[in-house]
Amino acid sequence: EFQTFAPIIHILYSKLQTQENEMCRLCQQRVYPMECLVADKQNFHKSCFRCHHCGSQLSLGNYASLHGKIYCKPHFKQLFKSKGNYDEGFGHKQHKELWNSKDRCSSNQNMTKT
C-alpha cells in the first residue's frame, strides 16, 4: 500500500515559511524561536535589543520606545521625559524656543509702549 507524505511536507513547509518571516527588526537576519524577543510587535535577536543611545543590552522590563527607536529607561528619561518634549531630537523645534520668542516679542512691545 502506498502512503503519501504530503500532509507532513505541507506542515513542515508552513513552519519554514513562518520562521522565514520572523526577521530581526535591526539586523534583518532570521530570528530563531530560542533567540527571539518580541517588543512593540517587532522581532529582535536578544543580542540586537539594545539602547539606541548608549548601546546597552535591554530586556522587556527595562526599555522604552519612541518613533521606532528603542532606549534604556534612564536615557529615555534623560533625552525626552525630563524635558517634557518627546519630539526633541527628531527635527522639531523645542517648545521652549517657541515660548521664548513670544515672550521676547511681547516684552519688546511693552518696552516701546512705555
Image (tube, rainbow, N blue to C red):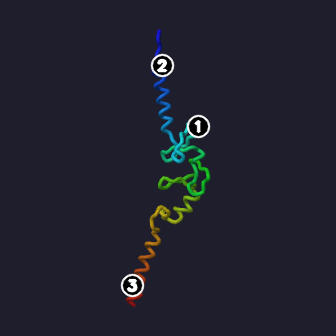
In the picture as drawn, the residue positioned furthest to the top comes out as: 1
Q: Mark 2 points at which residue?
A: 5
Q: Which amino acid does label 2 sit on?
A: Phe
Q: Which secondary structure, mark 2?
A: loop
Whichever of callouts 2 and 1 sits on the residue coming sooner in the sequence is 2
- Residue 78 is marked as none
Above-or-below relation of 10 to 60: above
Q: Which amino acid does label 1 sit on?
A: Met
Q: Label 1 neighbourhood size at 10 Å, few (<14), some (14-19), many (20+)?
A: few
Residue 78 x/y as whole percent: 56, 62
Whichever of callouts 3 and 1 sits on the residue coming sooner in the sequence is 1
Q: Label 2 neighbourhood size at 10 Å, few (<14), some (14-19), many (20+)?
A: few
Residue 60 x/y as whole percent: 56, 47
Q: What residue type is labelled 3?
A: Gln
How far is disc 3 from disc 1 in space, using C-alphas? Answer: 66 Å
Residue at the spot 45% in from the left edge and 21% down from the top edge: 6
Residue at the spot 59% in from the left edge and 50% down from the top edge: 58
Residue 88 x/y as whole percent: 49, 64
Q: Name the residue under label 3.
A: 109
Of the two numbered discs 3 and 1 in the rendering, the one whose residue sits closer to the viewer: 1
Q: Which secondary structure, mark 3?
A: helix
Residue at the spot 39% in from the left edge and 90% down from the top edge: 114
Q: Name the residue under label 1.
A: 34
